Structure formats: structure tokens, C-alpha cells
Amino acid sequence: MTNHVAYLPKPHLTRRLVDLAGQSGLVLTLVAIIVGFSFLAPNFMTVSNIMNVLLQASNIGIMAAGLTLVVICGEIDLSVASLQSLGAVIVAILVINVGIPIPLAIIAAIVAGAIAGLISGTIVGKFAVPAFIITLAMDSFGRGIALIMTNQNSVFGFPQSFSIFGQGYLGPVPVAAIIAAVVFLILHVVLSRTVLGTNIYAVGGNREAARLAGINIFGVKVAVLTISGLCGALAGVLMASRLMAAQPIMGMFDLMDVIAAVVIGGCSLLGGEGKMIGTVIGTLIITSIRNGLNLMGIPADWQLIAIGTIIVIAVLTDFSSRRTNAG
């Protein structure tokens, strides 16, 4: 008697088809937003404004890229916006007040952000404390340290050469956007081509299964939160370069945009799902909405309500999808 075996599609192939459909939907959403604002907002579709959107997206995108790793791992980092401020303040004080060369000051600021993330990751990984609690505390620490270092004042007086990172252009493209693209590319490779990337998905998808498989969960959490802290400080350096000044309260509302970019981009807040390309598109969607609303003269308070609404819709969609798949 011959046994007939039904060959089902490979799970990874099915997942790729789902991912492709989701990314196509994101692209269509971005196109619809661009087309809509091209009619509603004056000068939205000009080359100069498109480059301005890319410039505005640079610091949000860099923070979102780091946060993507954390969210896929099943955690959250609420400190990235304050570490952005801290990074800006550190580079400003070192360059302006201390006189340290710009490259060394930038490295010091980025290392400070990475150390903050390392501390958060170590506590989260070692004591199994939810990351949102520790990173919320780190958010207060980062903002408080920035306020103390500046005596609650703005720091300005950068040499003109520092402006290249936040105000410079390579052809028509902002240098800051190029830096953001490099960060996205590097972290895409980390997620898709390294053991760390595989382990990040494993820990976020099923922590207990990952532990039984011998994955170093502590190391993974430390790694993702360290990278996120580094990205936050790097974003701060770019922001300081764009403004040619540093303020301890700069970017206070950026966390909302960063989380929105990650969630809209397809990262599940429950962990285990997400792609860097999705975060890229999510960042462009959020930045385009911000830019279009600004051009239309919509007040900042209503913009916050709009972004908050978008986050709620994205989260409800994610949970509904998970519940449907589970059922």
C-alpha cells in the first residue's frame, strides 16, 4: 500500500509572501499620503521639500532603526529620545566648552549613549525586569543629566565645520539622510545575515523556546538595548549639527514618532516580527505626515493627537491580527 504525503508550502515561503504583502501595503500607504498632501499642502511635492522630509526623517529614522531590534526582541526602549538630547549635549559641551576635536567628541557622545543602553540591558537581562520600566527610568536619568550638564540652558557656538552632518548635502541629498541610510543598512544586515539577528527573532518569538535552544537571552537583550542607546545618541549628534546648538529638552516629543514609525512599519509590540525595510517606510510615512500637516498650518497639539491615533490603530491592528492567527 502506498502512502501519499501532502506537501505543504514551507513556512518560511509563506512568511515571505505575507511580508511582501505587508510591505506592498506600506508602500501604497506612503504613496497615498504623498499624493494626498500634494493636493492639500502647498509646495509639498517640490524637490526642496522632499529633501527636507528626508532630512527631518534622519534622526527619527536612526532612533527607529535601533528601536526595531528592541521591539523584535519583545522589549521596548522608552529612553531613546532623552538619549538623543544627552548625545547632543555631550557633543556640544565637549566641542564648545572643552575644545575636544569634533570626531573625538562625536565618538564620546555615541559611546555615552551605548553605555546607557548597556546599563539598561544589563538590568533587564540579569534581573528579568520589564524593559519599559528600566528604560523609563533611564529616560529620566538621561534628561536629568542633560539638564544638569547645561544648567538648563542651550549650548551653542559650534565651529562651522560641525554643520556638515546636519546641514550638509551630497549633491541634492542631505548628509544626515545618507548617515541614516547607512545605519538602516547595517542593522538590516544584522537582522537578516547574522546569528545575533536570528537570536533576536527567536527571543522575541518564544523566549522559553529560545532558552531551551541554548540562546543567550541575557546577551541578546544587552546587545539590542546597547545598539538602541547608541542610535539615540547618534541621532542627537545629527540634531545638534542641524540646529548648531544643543538643548537638554530637545526632541521631547520624538519618542511618539519613533514608536509610531516602528509599529506602522510592521514590528509587533509582542515581539518576534518586524523588518528594517518596514521601519524605513514607517519613518517616511510619519515624517511625511508631520511635514504635510506643518505645511497645512495644523498646530503641533493636533499633530500629537494624530500621531497618537495612528499608534493606537497600528497596535489594535497588530493585536487583532495576532488573535485571528492564533484562533
Image (tube, grey):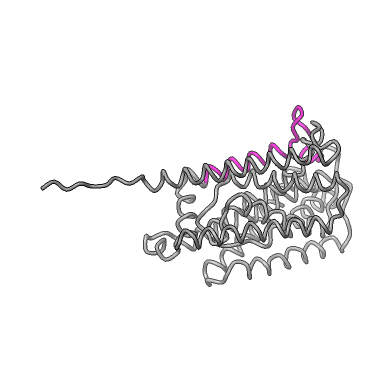
Residue drawn at point x = 72 percent, y = 43 percent: 33
Is the residue 37 above or below the residue 64 in the image? above
Q: Residue furthest top?
A: 171
Query: Percent x, y for residue 209?
Result: 39, 63
Label total for image: 0
Image quadrant in which you'd find residue 103:
top right
Q: Which residues are magenta?
A: 162-190
Nearest the viewer among 42 and 246 is 42
- The answer to if 185 sits in the magenta stretch is yes
> Relative to 246, is 285 on the left or the right?
left
Majority secondary structure of the magenta segment?
Answer: helix
Instruction: Say left or right for 210 vs 250.
Output: left
Residue 297 at what x, y percent from top left?
Answer: 88, 48
Residue 165 lies, with reference to residue 149, above or below; the image says: above
Question: If the image is split into quadrants, where does the C terminus sit?
Answer: bottom left
Q: Residue at x 79, y 31 (%)?
A: 47
Q: Give the residue drawn at x 88%, y 50%.
A: 156
State yes or no: residue 257 in magenta.
Answer: no
Q: Residue furthest left?
A: 1
Q: Position of residue 249 (x, y in %)?
A: 82, 60
Instruction: Give the image location of residue 266, x and y in percent.
Output: 58, 51
Instruction: Name above or below for residue 274 compared with residue 179.
Output: below
Instruction: Tell me if 171 is positioned left or right of 245 in this view.
Output: left
